[in-house]
Amino acid sequence: MNTKKRTDEQKKHQSETLKGRKKPPRSEEHKRKLSEVAKTRVFSKETREKLSRALIGNKRGLGYKHTEDAKRKIGLNGFHYGMKGKKHTEETKNKISMSNKGEKHHNWLGGRSLEEYGKDWTDDLKDSIRKRDIYICQLCGIHQEELDRSLDVHHIDYDKYNLNPENLIALCRNCHTKTSFNREYWSE
């Protein structure tokens, strides 16, 4: 084993040489050999204690637990720990909003959502569908009493003019939102 210390110049040269270089994928044989070596590795009692202390209380098991002060600082910089991070200015919010409106939005359907409902689309009709479905979301099974609002009434075939009760279903807002994506799947 080479025990000579490398100079700063040598370290810098090696660093520059390795930049941008990707490691080749390991073969199954190589992975198996590494696994066997790892199984025979013996740690000193002191090392085992350090590893144990580092992992205790860490939900992610990453081996490090931030102090409350560090969590607060990280949160202020827009990272994790449940902090909201930096706030957008009103100007930035408006720019984001404008960049996702209409045809620019990923869920744009050519203006179909702007169409009017049929004249018989009334609160009484919607209430009758909710009552028929026993005020329970027909996808997730949550009861309307558990929500802070009434169940939505969804057109199964996505045709706003088809008010046939067999085409209408009561859904909670969360499930109704899901049905906006992958419409072919939900129509079936």
Image (cartoon, rainbow, N blue to C red):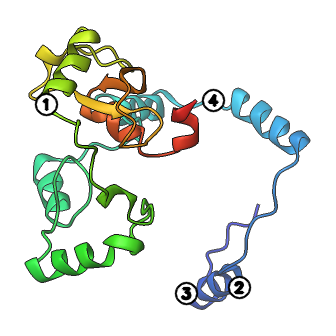
Residue at figure coordinates x 36%, y 43% from the top left:
160
Q: Residues within 10 Å of mark 2 (few under 14, many from 20)?
A: few
User: Closer to the N terminus: mark 2 or mark 3?
Assistant: 3
Per the rendering, the mark at residue 8 is: 3
Residue at figure coordinates x 36%, y 26% from the top left:
168
Residue position for label 4: 42
Residue position for label 1: 123
Q: Residues within 10 Å of mark 4 (few under 14, many from 20)?
A: few
4 vs 2, front mark: 2
| Image x and y of residue 56, in percent | 32, 28
Kind of residue at disc 1: Asp
Residue sitting nearer the eye, 185 or 97:
185
Residue at figure coordinates x 58%, y 41% from the top left:
184
User: Closer to the N terminus: mark 1 or mark 4?
Assistant: 4
Contact between marks 4 and 2 (CB within 8 A): the answer is: no
Residue sitting nearer the eye, 164 or 187:
164
